[in-house]
Image (spheres, rainbow, N blue to C red):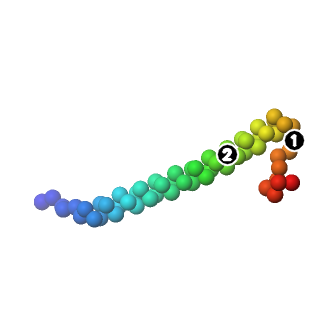
Amino acid sequence: MCEQTNPDLIEQQNFETLQEGLLDVKKQSIALRANLDKIIIACDHMLYGEEPFNEDGS
């Protein structure tokens, strides 16, 4: 006899899997943004030959 599946349980598992995937995407996006910021700073330094501004603009 086949075991019956619970649609609510399957939906909950799918939702949890989706949440985990979205959290991974968010973490990767944050890491990508940090890397892009580093690249922009390096390019500015190469183009203008000066140290980048500090966070406070000084």
Q: Residue at x 73, y 42 (%)?
A: 40
In the rendered image of this protein, does residue 34 appear above or below residue 43?
below
How far apart are the alpha carbons under marks 1 and 2?
A: 20 Å
User: Which residue does the numbered mark 1 point to in the structure image?
Assistant: 50
Amino acid type assigned to the residue bearing label 1 in the image = Glu
**Residue ranking furthest to the left:** 1
Left or right placement of residue 47 versus residue 23 in this view: right
Q: Residue 34, image x and y in percent?
A: 67, 49
Query: Residue 16, image x and y in percent?
Result: 40, 61
Answer with left or right where residue 33 lies relative to residue 55.
left
**Residue at the location (81% across, 34% down)?**
47
Residue at horizontal 41 percent and vertical 56 percent from the top? 18
How far across and down, in percent of the image, does residue 58 sit?
86, 54
Q: How many other residues sit within 10 Å of disc 2, few (<14), some (14-19) or many (≥20)?
A: few
- x 62%, y 46%: residue: 32
- Looking at the rendered structure, the secondary structure element under dot 2 is helix
Secondary structure beneath label 1: loop
Which residue in the structure is indicated by mark 2?
35
Closest to the observer, 2 or 11: 11
Q: Residue furthest top?
A: 47
Which callout, 1 or 2, points to the residue nearer the camera?
1
Name the kind of residue labelled 2 in the image.
Answer: Asn
Front-most of residues 25 and 50: 50
